């Protein structure tokens, strides 16, 4: 069940059978089954298989960041546009501990880091 404390409403999440680690934002959910990871709307519609979700040894249980982005092992998937950006890095890291971050970073060279602030990515509208 998804609860919105700002307006005191709740909505059942219609997840696929065998789903584990399902986490939802206001519109999208991310979860996994024995077959792999998936995205879906809260009502279960618009189901999409998604490979390579961030995390080791298994994908992290997290809602899409900003209700739009899914960090992958080698990039980031934009749910809004359906596109995936590949980041050529051995290891991606996701922000700081605590609240889910909107910042991905990775080592480019010795002593050099690159950063992607997902909050700065413009809407696809």
Image: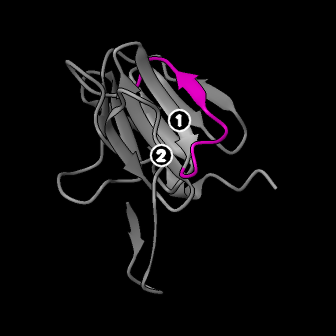
Using a 10 Å C-alpha cutoff, classify the residue at mark 2 as few (fewer than 14 neighbours), some (14 to 19) or many (20 or more): many
Task: Please give the name of the residue rendered at 38% of the width and 81% of the height, measured from the top-left corner.
Answer: 5
The C terminus appears in which quarter of the rendering? Answer: bottom right
Q: Which secondary structure class fits the magenta region best?
A: loop
SS at mark 1 in the image: strand
Residue 74: where, in percent of width, then height? 44, 20
Residue segment shown in magenta: 42-53
Task: Please give the name of the residue rendered at 77% of the width and 50% of the height, measured from the top-left corner.
Answer: 124
The N terminus appears in which quarter of the rendering? Answer: bottom left
For the view shown, which residue lies furthest in the bottom direction? 7
The residue that label 1 is drawn on is 39
Tell which of 62 and 96 is nearer to you: 62
* Callout 2–callout 1 Cβ contact below 8 Å: yes
**Eyeballing the image, is 22 above or below 120?**
above
Residue 102: where, in percent of width, then height? 41, 53
**Eyeballing the image, is 6 above or below 109?**
below
Tell which of 63 and 101 is nearer to you: 63
The residue that label 2 is drawn on is 29
SS at mark 2 in the image: strand
- Any magenta on residue 100? no
**Colour treatment of the image:** one colour
- Any magenta on residue 45? yes
49 sits to left or right of 89 = right
Q: Which mark is residue 84?
A: none
Residue 79: image quadrant is top right
Q: How many marks?
A: 2
Task: Please give the name of the residue rendered at 22% of the width and 21% of the height, measured from the top-left corner.
Answer: 56
For the view shown, which residue lies furthest in the right direction? 125
Residue 50: where, in percent of width, then height? 52, 23
N-term-proximal mark, 2 vs 1: 2
Tell which of 62 and 38 is nearer to you: 38
Residue 20: where, in percent of width, then height? 30, 33
């Amino acid at each position: 069940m998804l609860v919105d404390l700002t307006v005191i409403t709740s909505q059942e999440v219609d997840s696929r059978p065998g789903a584990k680690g399902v986490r939802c934002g206001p519109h999208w959910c991310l979860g996994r089954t024995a077959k792999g990871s998936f995205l879906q709307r809260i009502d279960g519609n618009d189901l999409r298989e998604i490979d390579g979700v961030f995390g080791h040894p298994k994908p992290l249980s997290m809602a899409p960041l900003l209700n739009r982005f899914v960090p992958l092992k080698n990039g980031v998937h934009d749910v809004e546009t359906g596109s995936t950006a590949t980041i050529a890095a051995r290891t991606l890291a996701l922000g700081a501990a605590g609240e889910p971050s909107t910042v991905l970073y990775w080592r480019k060279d010795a002593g050099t880091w690159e950063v992607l602030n997902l909050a700065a990515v413009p809407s696809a509208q």
